Structures are given as structure tokens and as C-alpha cells.
């Protein structure tokens, strides 16, 4: 079993300190930013959102992990047990060396 960590996209926000109209963003503001980008507005806002893709993403190695040659060099196996917590943040693992194949 392979564990794949896929980090979420990081968001950076900036509101200039001199902006007198700085307020928490509402759903109407998000919809105007996302859907009405080409619409001319009378007043320019000084709010920017940048999406940055993480360079350390391991999701691209999924195909390499699936095609990995797992031919054993010896007659012993190492079994790795992985527990993932309910939030997905805490991960525990334990490994055991097995001297012969397990039959069901």
C-alpha cells in the first residue's frame, strides 16, 4: 500500500493598509471576483488573491508508484500498517517482518 500526500493549494491574500474600505470578504464579493472579471467597475478595489501551486506535490508520482517493481529479493516480507486519523493530519504506521507468505 502506498501513501500519497497531496497538499492543498496555498492561498495568499493582501489588503493594503491604507485602504479605508477594508472589510471581510462576503459571498457577493467572491462571486463578483470570480464570475464578473471582465465587467468594468466604477471604483477599483485593492484586494488581490493569488493561487500558488505547491512544487512539492507527490500526486504526480502516483503512476510511478503503481508501476513499481516489487519483486522480493529474499523470502521475507515487510508489511507496513498505516493508520490515518479522522482529520487526515495525523498518520501512524507500524511495520512487521513476515518470514513466509500469509494464507487467508
Image: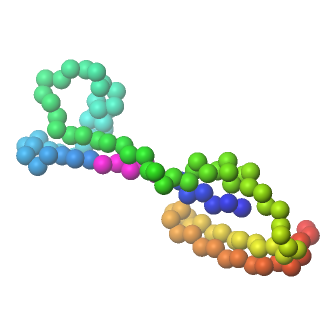
Which residue is more in the foreground, 66 or 45?
Answer: 66
Overall secondary structure of the magenta stretch?
Answer: strand
Q: Residue at x 85, y 73 (%)?
A: 74
Work out which quarter of the rendered image holds the C terminus and state it.
bottom right
Looking at the picture, how far across and down is residue 69, in whole percent? 78, 57
Instruction: Tell me how the rendering is colored.
Output: rainbow
Toward the front, the furthest residue is 73
**What span is colored magenta in the figure?**
8-12
Work out which quarter of the rendered image holds the N terminus and state it.
bottom right
Looking at the picture, how far across and down is residue 4, in whole percent? 60, 57
The answer to whether any part of residue 74 appears in the image is yes
The answer to whether any part of residue 7 appears in the image is no
Q: Residue at x 21, y 20 (%)?
A: 40
Above or below: residue 81 compared with residue 52: below
Q: Residue at x 29, y 41 (%)?
A: 49
Above or below: residue 36 compared with residue 13: above
Amino acid at each position: 500500500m502506498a501513501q500519497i500526500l497531496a497538499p492543498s493549494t496555498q492561498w495568499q491574500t493582501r489588503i493594503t493598509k491604507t485602504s479605508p474600505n477594508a472589510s471581510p470578504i462576503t459571498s457577493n464579493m467572491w462571486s463578483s471576483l470570480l464570475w464578473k472579471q471582465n465587467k468594468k467597475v466604477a471604483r477599483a478595489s485593492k484586494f488581490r488573491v493569488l493561487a500558488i501551486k505547491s512544487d512539492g506535490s507527490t500526486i504526480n508520482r502516483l503512476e510511478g508508484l503503481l508501476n513499481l517493481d516489487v519483486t522480493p529479493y529474499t523470502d521475507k516480507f515487510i508489511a507496513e500498517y498505516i493508520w490515518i486519523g479522522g482529520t487526515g493530519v495525523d498518520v501512524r504506521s507500524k511495520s512487521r517482518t513476515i518470514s513466509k507468505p500469509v494464507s487467508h
